[in-house]
Image (cartoon, grey):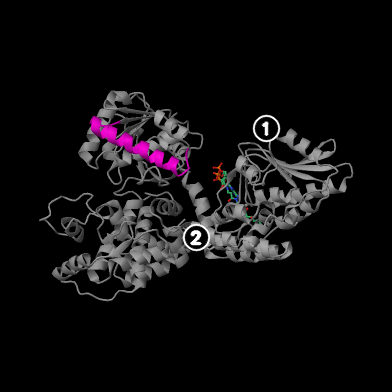
Amino acid sequence: MTSPIRTERHDNVLVIISDNPPVNALGQAVREGLADGIAEALADDSVEAIVVRCDGRTFFAGADITEFGKKPQGPNLPEALDKLEASDKPVVAAIHGTALGGGCEVALACHYRVAVPSAKIGLPEVKLGLIPGAAGTQRLPRLVGAQAALPLVAIGDPISAKAAKAIGLLDAVVGEDTLEADAIAFARSMVGKPVRRSSEGTANQDGVKNPAIFDDFRAKYGRKMRGFDAPNAAIEAVKAAGESSYADGVSKERELFGKLMTGSQSKAMRHYFFAERAANKIDDVPKDTPLIAINRVGIIGAGTMGGGIAMNFLSAGIPVTILEMKQEALDRGTGVMRKNYENTAKRGRMTAEQVEQAMGLLTPTLEYDDLADCDLVIEAVFENMDVKKQVFGKLDEVVKPGAILASNTSYLDIDEIAASTRRPGYVVGLHFFSPANVMKLLEIVRGEKTRDDVLASSMKLAKKIGKVAAVSGVCPGFIGNRMLSKRQEQANKLIMEGANHWDVDDVLLDFGFPMGPFQMGDLAGLDIGWHRDPSKVTTVREALCAAGRFGQKAGKGFYDYDEARQRTPSDEVKHIIADFAESAGNEQREISKEEIQERLLYPMVNEGAKILDEGMAQRASDIDVVWINGYGWPLHTGGPMFWAQEVGLGTVISGLEKHDLPVSDYLRTKAGAGNAFD
Ligand code: 3H9
């Protein structure tokens, strides 16, 4: 097998080049080739400087994640990098694309780093439940200081070349098209000068002089890091970089890395990494399916949902025509969009110019005819089949042939909607989650007649607007809401049997969800779908609405809310629930946290199994993607289906049986056949 690494001589400079598509992951053959390349350069007296670069779309994007959990083969990365750094001949990393994780560590072990303006650099290991394991936590703070290193190591978001230059992570930003030549020239300019090794840097002393930076960091990012082990380990490693010798710091990093690598969180998060990518693939849609170009999007409805959906496209530079029935609603909707953008700008995440750019791409209209030229139209109108059918009938008349017609319905039958047009093949469900400009998930609902090119184009578009997509078949509630309804059913029953609603919420918070079912109801508004007749009370929810407890927006719902939106349980609600339970003749009992968790989560797994059995999801990991991105299922547990496997499908079945809950045949079959869904 030919090595993915080759070397090229440019007079006195040896260029070590990796060509390992798609992302130059640092697998065994790459590490071996890299070690050989370094040895070649060091052994040859006529080589005076070294450049490390990659072919293809990116610099090394990190260790090869597919090798994790397997027996290590070939030279290990830390040792290869130590040899590289020990060189007396200057070594320059020439970066394009993304230098991530182990790739960033290669760059850190080089004496100098140059990059093109479009490059991104970072240590995203925390997103895989890890910390850098090839001395990244030790070299980076010594080079740029603990303060600058902390977010890179503990939060894991990559930074631009410009930002990297500003903190001293890069030595130069070079021409977009002249990377190799510029890197060689840079390397030559360093010949004869003493090399600068990151491991010998002293910038890390900022954390020793001012240890408060660690506490401040924890305070700032506490919420984001809640429940995750890796960010704390990352902070510990960066701290050790200031307090210990380089060798001791590296040992500390090894110890922390090893613990995380064998732990359950990283296993789950690595599962998720591949799950997200797998969800992008539709098994029976060929990879080379021609795509429908989407240059203009139409949105019907400028309410919260329609406006949020529109913002996704505007932010991605795609013009949007937004339709409302009345001028007043149109003005209100576009006003809210502008305000949302302006708030983002206030928080420094957008410039005023970008706000104007985005809003400049918006065309508000009251006329269906103005949607004629759109390549995709998404309706976000009232959830009612007759209304949807009317809208689609109208779209069928006015929108050009070949355009995609999408519904944002969260549970209605896409096939029935499609049948109201003469082009059902072009109809698809694009289910965005509220707030649609923030939530990552896009459920793509595949109708019986949805064409391959419509699906493939929807997938591609999802990526373009920064969404994580998963395909669902047509069934009530699709993947996400169908499973949610099982959880809600149990939540409602639990409070009738004696569980406090705040205990039900707290069990899910402890599990790692950002909120529980009753908090979620309060946030969404308890009056959604309410018949608005206070004298007609048949459920707790109706009773709360009748008492004006509409949720957070009213300052009261299941909880009372203060001005900071902090919740406190309310006596009024306690009585309402108790009255309901009594009139239903429900016996009240103490319900353990264990029972609450089992009854909330196991029925979801069972429903997920049914969804798989019916072919409504392509794979179990797609269900994990839906729940992690659409409903706040904690990433560090890998999603409901992965989590169930870790708990043991047999345990899930016994739990369901213990609580007299149904168990699907599919779940039983999978439990009996190796405890694995996929
Ligand atoms: C690490 O480095 C630990 C060290 O500190 C320790 C050393 C001792 N490995 O995302 P895409 C595959 S941890 C294996 O769709 P994009 C991916 O599965 C690592 N495979 O492309 C997909 O395969 P397929 C730290 C990888 O252009 C294909 O490549 N690094 C890896 O949207 C294309 O990927 C990271 O966490 C990998 N490292 O985005 C970076 N990376 O086609 C992880 C990708 O079969 N990678 N694949 O589905 C990324 O963030 C994105 O892939 C990247 C490109 C931004 C690079």
Residue 332 covered by magenta stretch: yes
Residue 15 is drawn in which quadrant? Answer: top right
Q: Where is residue 400 shown, x and y percent of the image?
A: 34, 24
Depth check, front residue: 510 or 649: 510
As measured in the structure, the alpha-carbon distance from the residue carrying label 2 to the one carrying label 1 is: 39 Å
**Numbered circle sitting on residue 535:** none
Q: Residue furthest front?
A: 209
Q: Nearer the viewer, mark 2 or mark 1?
A: 2
Q: Secondary structure at mark 1?
A: loop
Type of amino acid at the residue the image marks with label 2: Ala
With respect to residue 676, does 10 lie above or below? Answer: above
**What residue is pinned by disc 1?**
175
Disc 1 packing (10 Å; few <14; some 14–19; many ≥20): some
Q: Secondary structure at mark 2?
A: helix
**What residue is pinned by disc 2?**
219
Q: Where is residue 286 shown, x and y percent of the image?
A: 48, 37
Depth check, front residue: 358 or 125: 358
Question: What residue is rendered at 21% in x and 49% in y?
Answer: 529
